[in-house]
Each structure stands twice: as C-alpha cells, then as structure tokens.
Amino acid sequence: MPAIHQRRPPSRILDPLTGLLLRAPEVAHAANIVQAVEASLPALKAYMPFAHLPQTEDTQYDRLVKVCADYWRGDDFHLHLFDAASGALLGGLGLHRKAHHAHAMEIGYWIRSDRAGQGLCTHAAQMAVALAVHRFDCVRVQCVYDPSNAASARVAEKVGFQVECDLPGFLPTGTDAMRAEGWRVSGTARMTALSADRARAQPWWDDLVARLQWWDGQGRPVVDCA
C-alpha cells in the first residue's frame, strides 16, 4: 500500500481500543460541526476565533471547501474527531504549518463541552502527534496556548509537551465585540513543544502506535511496516 506522508495524508485513523476516530475533513461534516460548536460556544468563544463567526451550515461548507483542498494538497491538516461507534462528532484537531521549521508542525485542538473532562482531547492529541511524527516524519510538534487556558495546558502536559517560553504580544487580543462575548486571550502565548525523540519516549507511545489503524486517501487499509 502507498505510504502515508504529507502529500498522501490518511483519510482515517482509528484507535480500536477507545473507539476514537480521526477523519479527514469533508463538506458532509458541515451540519455536525455546527451542532458541536453551538453546543460548546461559551467555552470556545473564550479562546477560539472561529467561534465568533456565524455558525451556519453555509459558513462551514465554505470553510470546509478550503480546508479539504489544503488537506489533500498537503498544505494544512484539519481533522475531525468522531466516536466510531455512534458516529457523533466530538471535536476537531489540526496540524498546522506555523512552526519555523520545514519538518515541524503546530497542533491545535478542541472538544465539545458535553464531552470535556473525559480524556478524549488528550487521547486525540496523542493520535495527532503519532500522525505528525510516525507518518509525517516531523522532528518537532509545538503547541501554543494562552496561559489562562487551563484545559489546553492540561492536555499539552498529559501528551508530554514541555514549556519553552512565554511570548508577550504574540496572540491576537481580539476585538471589543469578541471580548463582550467572552474572549479571554491576553495576547501572551505559551510555547510548548515535543520533539520526535521525546514523543517516542512517552509512556503512551508504543501501545498507541502499535494498535492504530490507518486508511489512505482512497480508503484502503495501510499496513504499518515501520
């Protein structure tokens, strides 16, 4: 089977133990995304700029057209997290080309509010790190968040990211309208990172990578010979 790399990203990644499924973006996900975001608006509006946009299927459809093209070109990687058994959309993750290194990426994540606190976001982030390091050959994955975002900090710590520095004035402080709707970003960014070697040394790495199931862009199972 073809290898999975940045020009041939996976269509699906399944952890059969937890039933968590990462899927490539599809325009068919528009309604599910709107529902998940609307169920989580107070939490998302604190730190996620997209939560301040109109939450309509048309808006999501237009966004998904772009992110699908970016994904399959290998320019940027948005993924949606599903419960494989129920088909429910649980949240979203991204591997973005924001790092100042050709073989590094920046991870972002969110989980719907009614499923927060269950370890799902941590586990999904581990799956995304496995994709970045094990399949995309990244040497570094970084995670950037506002220091007041305790939930993001907990996920990063559990995955194994190490704090490198705080960068004042690095994040957008938002508009008056955004702040009136709950925007809490201070402008300071906490930079954390996980090298490929450190990722492989995490206690969760070996078992997770061994059991993950992968499908290529045409929906064919990929046999892991690494």
Image (cartoon, helix red, strand yellow):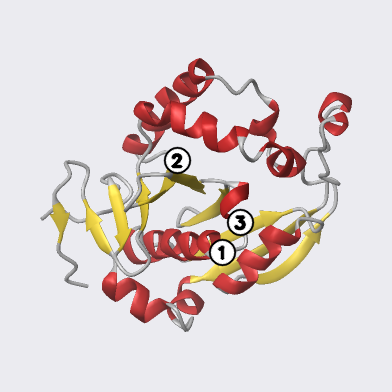
| Residue sitting at x 44%, y 78% | 204
SS at badge 3: loop
User: Mark 3: which amino acid?
Assistant: Ala
SS at badge 1: loop
Residue occupying the far left of the picture = 1
Image quadrant where one finds the C terminus: bottom left
User: Mark 2: which amino acid?
Assistant: Asp
Q: Nearer the viewer, residue 53 or 118?
A: 118
Rendered image: mark on residue 116: 3
Q: CA distance from mark 2 to mark 3?
A: 26 Å
Residue 140 falls left or right of residue 215: right
Q: Position of residue 175 (x, y in %)?
A: 84, 27
- 10 Å neighbourhood of mark 3: few (<14), some, or many (≥20)? some
Q: Is residue 90 above or below residue 19?
A: above
- Disc nearest the viewer among 2 and 3: 3
Disc 1 target residue: 118
| Residue sitting at x 35%, y 58% | 136
Q: Is residue 225 above or below residue 74?
A: below
Rendered image: mark on residue 76: 2
Residue 160 falls left or right of residue 219: right
SS at badge 2: loop
Asked if marks 3 and 1 touch (Cβ < 8 Å), the reply is yes
Residue 180 falls left or right of residue 93: right
Q: Is there any visible trace of residue 32 in the rendered image? A: yes
Q: Is there any visible trace of residue 191 in the rendered image? A: no
Asked if marks 2 and 1 touch (Cβ < 8 Å), the reply is no
| Residue sitting at x 68%, y 41% | 44
Residue 165 falls left or right of residue 75: right
Q: Nearer the viewer, residue 86 or 52?
A: 86
User: Mark 1: which amino acid?
Assistant: Gln
